[in-house]
Image: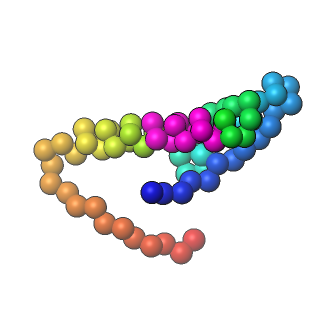
Amino acid sequence: MSEYTVIVEFDPATGLYCGQCQQLPEAISQGSTEDELMTNIREAIELVLEDRAENIKRLYSGRSFTRRSIAVNA
């Protein structure tokens, strides 16, 4: 299980809470309450991760590769 940061903004013009995942900018959602927003953004994050995994499988299908982690001081 991973943690993600969600930037939450209330839009008084629409009365909706809007959110965007900081680590996955394409994961965007909204809700009428913060709880509803968090439920919706969780689903958006899961969909983005699923799509990325499918793209990686397609890109590397038939190729031999390894995954390595690296720590960076930033």
Which stretch did the figure color magenta?
A: 37-47
Q: Position of residue 36 (x, y in %)?
A: 66, 35
Given residues 51 and 61, the one toward you in this image is 51
43 magenta-colored: yes
> Which residue is painted at 31% across and 38% down in the image?
54
Quadrant location of the C terminus? bottom right
Q: Position of residue 64 (x, y in %)?
A: 15, 54
Is residue 3 depicted above or below 14 in this figure? below
Q: Residue furthest right?
A: 12
- Say whether residue 26 is visible: no
Q: Is residue 53 above or below residue 40?
A: below
In the rendered image, residue 70 lying in the magenta stretch gets the answer no
Question: From the viewer's perspective, is 21 left or right of 53?
Answer: right
Front-lying residue, 70 or 40 = 40
Query: Which residue is pictured at 63% across the width and 42% down the height?
Result: 38
Using the rendered image of the protein, determine whether residue 53 is visible from the camera's viewpoint: yes
Magenta stretch, main secondary structure, is helix
Which residue is farthest front? 35
Instruction: Indicate the quadrant where residue 37 lies.
Output: top right
The quadrant where residue 35 appears: top right
